[in-house]
Amino acid sequence: MRPGFLAKNPSVIWFLLILAIFTLVITLLSHAYGPGVISTSMVKTLGKTLCLCLIAIAMDLVWGYTGILSLGHFAFFGLGGYMIGMWLMYERTRDIVLKSASDFPMTPHELQDAIGSQIFGVVGSSKLPAIWHFAGSLPMQLLFVVLVPGLLALVFGWLAFRSRVAGVYLSILTQAMTLALSLYLFQNESGLRGNNGLSGLQNIPGLSADQDHSSVWFLWASACALALGYVLAAAIVSGKFGSVMRGIRDDEARVRFLGYPVEGFKLFVFTLTAVIAAIAGALYYPQAGIINPGEMAPIASIYLAVWVAIGGRGRLYGAVMGAFFVSIVSSWFTGGRVPDVPLGFYTIKWVDWWQVLLGLSFVLVTLLAPKGLSGLVELIAGLRPPRRGGAPLGPDAGSLQEEEARE
Amino acid sequence: MRKVLMTLGLFLMLALPGVAQERSSQTVPATAGQAAEPTTALAAVLAENVKKIAKPSRRTIGPVIDEIAASGPGASRFLQAWADRRVGLRKSDDTLFIIAEQGQDYALSDPVTGAPADTAPRREISEVKPNSGVRAVIGSALVRFLLSDPDPAKRREALTAIERDGEASHLAPLRASIAQEPDAQIKAGKQRLERLLTIRFGKDAGERVAAIDSFGSDTGLDLRATLNPLVATTRRAFEGEPQGNIAKTLRPARELSEADAYALLVAANMAPKRISEAAMKQALAANVVDGKVGGLPLADMSDPAKRALAYSALAKAGTVTPRLSETEAQALIDAHSYADIYAEPDATVTKSAEAGLARVSRKVAMMQSVDLGLDGLSLASIYFLAAIGLAITFGIMGVINMAHGEFITMGAYTGYVVQQFVPDYTASILIALPLAFAITFGAGVAMERLVIRYLYKRPLETLLATFGISIALQQLFKNIFGTQARPLTSPPWLEGALQINDIVSISYIRIAIFVLALVFLTLYLWVMKRTRLGLEVRAVTQNPSMAASMGINPDRINMLAFGFGSGIAGIAGVAIGLFAKVTSEMGQDYIVQSFMTVVVGGVGSIFGTLAGATLIGGLQKGIEFLNPSNTLAAQTYMILFIIIFIQFRPRGIVALKGRAAGD
């Protein structure tokens, strides 16, 4: 009998268990459902971090397993946030307009104009652009969360893979795409409020609960999405499809000569991960409350790669660990909660020096511990690969061929 | 005869209180007779017109001023004084003097000769105060004198005064003065001004058209300033056919929106003002009775059609003023015609002016494209300079160095620090250039030894590791130099711009960068093709193990090549810092563009990098020209173009073939 899904992926059980316990503990310690040991803003930070873990899984699929170092996934993340943000902002503004309006009923046209001038007053315009046509409908905008980034990824990926752009060239190209997108959104003419971005997203229209409660609900939603994303990713990488993905990473030409349509596989993974990233973004920004094009700058996507690399590529739990660890430590350091180190002649203020520390530790991880944090897990679990010796299975010395050959 | 006697009498009378010089001219009448002749002419005119001069009115003063102007020497002095309100009338004997305040009194001087005459207490003199109309007439008479003044500076002054504020009356004296103008330059200026004035004030259309045509495609701003008012139009509504010099007839709903057409009608009082939607809503809201408006339930009011119904019901009841219905408004719009009408009535002149302007704008467009080309070239040289270091580390060695931008920043900060110690800007730049090279060379070698050499076979990880170095360095710069921009001042001989004409100009600093880019191109070619180092670098990049077996040390070569590329980035940093702000993030602005330049150009070829820089720089300027208000959009479209370009030439403009391509 062939081994079942869970038997092939022992990490899934552990992961779901830890995630459930984590979410439960946070809920029971929160302001809304417990003694309030954990502040609401902390709950929000943790919820956001879970969304970042989800996009890290997407990044691990596309980079760690398929070998495409995409520096554009944060753009999809941001696009997803924009799509849901449009609905949130439109509905909330509509409520405000209706509340402040007189008893005399408004025509639909007047209502549109009032909402338009409320939303676009900051950028000196009062008309709702055409892309806001469906902003009043939640199902449409939810569809757009998936469709818009998915289509963009499909078109871009098709163009890029078709012309056999690979390796670092693809990285630079995706970075260029991200830059173009964020520059485009920075313009007022793009119809998404330029550099002001969309704001007030933490208020969910039609929801009477306060922030204490809604933040916990969002934490649960993020945890569910993360769990689903993890199971989906595990299912993909554990099957035959996953083997082809790893094959593409290790030796693309060989897989092509074996008769697999490499471009199709790459395109599928690229688009699927873009959609996962967009869903993560759609959950992230209502918790963050504001989105602006600065969030989609190329540097954000590089940080994403940093998380995955620190966590350990080619392992789903590694990606999650990296994203969680780095973003929590990062918010700890930049929040000014770490004590300064007085050296006598100079005091190290961590707010200033955290970036230097991150940069250098990143270099060290790349050089000395290519497995990242997940290497620790293997050390503890005794998952170390058998010593086979000999040359690696593929030409890419950084890949982890020998361990995967065991599966 | 009587005139002569009177003149004589006046002369004697003026001379009576005179001083020594005055008497001397009287004592030698035989010699002074000739010179005194025209002077007396002015004196005669003055004596004759005392009343008119003292109380001038614009209508009657013309002939008098003409007479004065024609009366020869002294006339300009008198007119000038008159225009400046420095002429006074002595009440005791109705005599005119040029006056100047002197304590409590007026110092008088002779209006004809300008010789000091007397002083008089204030109450004895009534000041002559010509109004502005009269002063304008005097002014134009004065222009004649200024235009033929013996002092060239005065003549130039008069020309600029007319250029600034020309009038029809200037035309005749200007024409008259051209023939006797001795200075060639001023003469040319006068002729040009004469033609400009002819365009504006010429008597008949033929003369004006000839003047317009005589300019050809001259791009002078003065010509455009003269022609533009001629073709200025106003948009008007007409009953029946349009009247006047029509520039363009406008049909409603085609060339003219119906709302605009109606607004024109309202402005011309040809149609009543429509009650706006907002006013209609207010009137409806004010007339809600028992939850009903005009017989319709309040809830229906969200429908515009129902609103109109309710309003007409209210209007029928007499509670509100009736509103023009759409069809009535449409009928009004259709019943009128609309046109743009030239302010200038003469059709031949406007036609010729339009043609002249078209010629001018064609020429201007040509000049602008030259200017745009220069702009693009200078942007291209900046990109080339930023990318040339990358062409070595990325293009030849295949190392993605994300910290390349930080090397540029490092060079710029080196320049800033040097300027803190060496106050002379020229010397500091000359010190900073080699120093920046040395420092970034060192940084590059250190990075290669410590990090990159372990990752030569893992290009994606090189990208990430160097990115880590990049963010660490960026924060380090912030900690050392702060977040605000630091100045890097260029030497004084690089300030200013080379002005080729009104439109085309290029700043010296950009020329310097262009030259620097050429120098580096040459340096690169020389190092790569003519030196031992270049030979070994090429050998190692093509086949490291073969090169090693030939006795080349690949480690040493990689280190030197990486250091060389980084050093060039440092020098580029100094050059870029001269015109851009030096901040810790300046390198970020160039890194993506630099990679684009190398990728678009074709990896591994310096001429490819050059072509890539030219393409990207030219393209960016071109897009900016099409959409000048928006540099962000230009960058967006440029990147989109690059993404699409890569689809068709994945290996760049200059693609290496065969083994050198590396695959």
Image (cartoon, coloured by chain):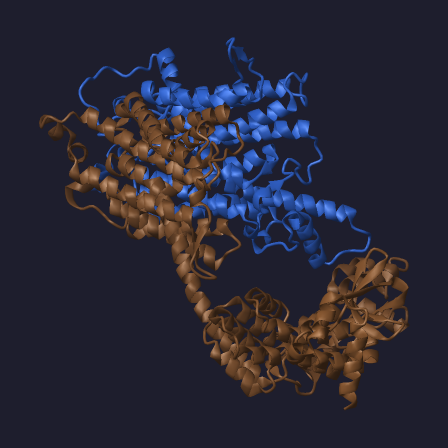
Q: Residue at x 59, y 45 (%)?
A: A86
Q: Decide: is A18 above or below B652.
A: above
Q: Colour of chain B?
A: brown
Q: Residue at x 66, y 77 (%)?
A: B32
Q: Decide: is B481 above or below A172.
A: above
Question: Which x, y percent locates residue A200?
Answer: 65, 38
Residue situated in front as seen by the camera: A331 or B263: B263
The answer to whether any part of residue B592 appears in the image is yes
Residue situated in front as seen by the camera: A265 or B325: B325
Question: Which x, y percent locates residue A202?
Answer: 64, 35
Q: Decide: is A92 above or below A228.
A: below
Q: Residue furthest left?
A: B550
Q: Colour of chain A?
A: blue
Residue situated in front as seen by the camera: A71 or A240: A71
Quadrant of the drawing holding the C terminus of chain B: top left
The answer to whether any part of residue A158 appears in the image is no
Quadrant of the drawing holding the N terminus of chain B: bottom right
How many numbered tags mark residues here? 0
Q: Residue furthest bottom?
A: B1
Quarter where residue B348 is shown = bottom right
Q: Decide: is B389 above or below A181.
A: above
Question: Which x, y percent locates residue B621?
Answer: 43, 54
Quarter where residue A237 is shown = top left
Q: Residue furthest front?
A: B27
Question: Which x, y percent locates residue B43?
Answer: 75, 78
Side of B419 where A378 appears, left or right: left
Side of B662 where B156 appears, left or right: right
